[in-house]
Image (cartoon, coloured by chain):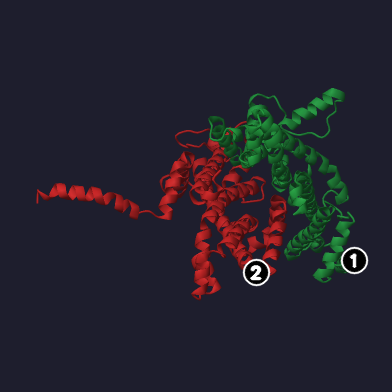
Chain colours: A red, B green
Amino acid sequence: MVGSIPASATAELSAAPRSKAKQFSPWLDAWRRFRRHRLALVSTVVLSAIVLSVLFMPFVWSVPINEIDFTARLKGPSPAHPFGTDDLGQDLLSRMLYGGRISLAVAFAAMVVAIVVGTIIGAIAGMSRGWVGPALMWLTDLFLSLPPLPLLLLVIYLFRDSLKSVFGPEGGVFILIVLVVGGLRWMPAARLVRAQFLSLREKEFVEAARALGASRLRQVIRHILPNALGPVIVAATVDVAAAIIAESTLSFLGLGFPPDIPSWGRILFDAKDYLDIAPHWAMFPGVAIFLTVLSISFIGDGLRDALDPRKVM
Amino acid sequence: MGQYLLKRLLIAIPSILGISVILFTVLALAPGDPFEELATNPNVPAEVREMLRQKFGLDDPVAIRYFRWLAAMAQGDFGFSFASRIDVGDLIMQRLPTTLIIIGLAQLIALAIALPVGVYAATRPYSIFDQIASTFAFVGFSLPPFFTGLLLILVFSIQFDWLPFVYRADIEATGWRWFWEHVRQAIMPVSVLALFLAASLTRYVRSSVLDVIRLDYVTTARAKGLGERVVITKHVVRNALIPVVTLVFLQLPALFGGAIVTEQIFRIPGIGSLLISSILANDTPVVMAVTFVSAILVVLFNLIADILYGWLDPRISYG
């Protein structure tokens, strides 16, 4: 047994390169390229920290978000209130954590809406050979030339009250904002998916699948879509950042969430009139939005290097 | 060129019609009634309400209402503001110039920053300067305008008390003093928008220059002994700027959004703050008209961008 040790060691040495070569996969390759983008790596850590603390900190820091304490109005950060308090003496740390859940949930859901709608429209436009494709692209260009914020405000203005009465104040506003923010951002994804489909559908492997008798749906889902996924993931990342900004812009204008649902933009909206006496109140949500969006943008940039090698500048 | 111009114009018309259909559909789908106020008002008898509804044709089929609305919009008749009690067209014309001046100034400053920085970064890709510039660009478009605005107010108005943070349209001074007051109050809103714009423009200029700098004719220019400065300014930048011109105009939809937020923060009496205040006052005619006007302006600027693009790059108009 003792004598066999060197033999196994050399055997392992010679086997090592082979097992490494076997481990090669597109995802591993992408991770290798992503790792090279140092800012993207740092951003992943920052974003994970934000997401994890928003998700799990409320279990540790269990001060209610609406506990009013007039003796501690507009106080700066202190051990009792690490992020200070607002004009009603409500604890800002727990409001920030709650708001983070809202802002991130809205952004994620809006991104899913935008990507699903965009992928479906882009896929139909990319697969059709008749008039459907150009017609859908004309519609896409039309939506791209609409000024997004005025339209967002218009839709919210017109539909706010009826959705509130159906789904309740929280659910109604949440659904409305997700649908509107996501529904007005599907265009870039649609164009991207269409461009990918136009080149992929002529590739030999798709032709082979067609020759084997694969239906059009199977060609799309099994063969074309997985190969178009890289740029779509990059677009999805950008969309999350854009949705965070859109939601906080709406809340900042006072047309998003009501004051009892403090999303980050809403906290900023409430804080803006107390800028001179309580600057900390505006700084925390502002910095949180900024850090989240910045880290998502860097991650998107890193993902572009990793998943979309054509676009590397 | 003539044919290209005509083609672009013919594409713009269905776009405007399409936008009007989208806006009208949104309005028609929306629950609620513009005469709700009258319906709940006990002083208005039911017959009067019926007569008003008939006069404004509220019970007609959707298609007829759409064409009537479109005809009114085309004649510049935007209706009557419920809240301000004046013509919506006049109200918009009062507010539009301020917004256009702020947006235009911001665009100019953004170009003045983005052009040199983008070109310099592209001639030295992956250098320290390039990396710092691109980091700043990321910071610039990750800072939402509402936060930049509050930060500027915090620093320059509250901390140092250098600049006013409320925009006043009626400054009493005259002559240079009047001009100086206007400049002072415009500094912060314009820089908020300019920063937001310059960030994305810088990255765009950089990648556009990088695309051109690798082309063969640039190598030829260098090979015949031209100095680097002449090669960059006369040969590279001229061609690299063509797509940038388009982007300057295509950024307008996003810029309108930024202007709404900025006007709200600094209380600038522009078209964006008009939109917000009429939403809060349930003033439907104004809300519809402002949205429609901003959409028309965007289509118009897209058209200008297309025409400029075809003029600057003849390959496009012959293609």
Pick the residue in front: A237 or B92. Answer: A237
Percent coordinates x, y for residue A65 in the rendering: 51, 46
Q: Secondary structure at mark 2?
A: loop
Percent coordinates x, y for residue A302 in the rendering: 50, 45
Instruction: Give the crowd class for mark 2: few <14, some 14-19, many >=20 residues within 10 Å.
Output: few
Mark number, residue A129: 2
Percent coordinates x, y for residue B56 in the rendering: 87, 64
Mark number, residue A30: none
Looking at the image, which residue is at 85% across and 61% down?
A: B70
Task: Write down the residue under mark 1.
Answer: B55
Type of the residue with mark 2? Arg
**Position of the C terminus of chain A by quadrant:** top right
Q: CA distance from mark 1 to mark 2?
A: 49 Å
Same chain for the residues under marks 1 and 2 in the image: no
Residue A74 seen from this side: no
Q: Is residue B50 left or right of residue B314?
A: right
Number of residue marks = 2
Percent coordinates x, y for residue B286 in the rendering: 81, 52
Which of pointers 1 and 2 indicates the residue nearer the eye? 2
Q: Are marks 1 and 2 in contact (CB under 8 Å)?
A: no
Q: Is residue B105 left or right of residue A94?
A: right
Residue farthest bottom in this picture: A213
Q: Is residue A25 left or right of residue B269?
A: left
> To which chain does the residue with label 2 belong?
A
Residue B65 seen from this side: yes
Q: Is residue B63 left or right of residue B225?
A: right
Instruction: Give the crowd class for mark 1: few <14, some 14-19, many >=20 residues within 10 Å.
Output: few
Type of the residue with mark 1? Lys
> To which chain does the residue with label 1 belong?
B
Pick the residue in front: B295 or B228. Answer: B228
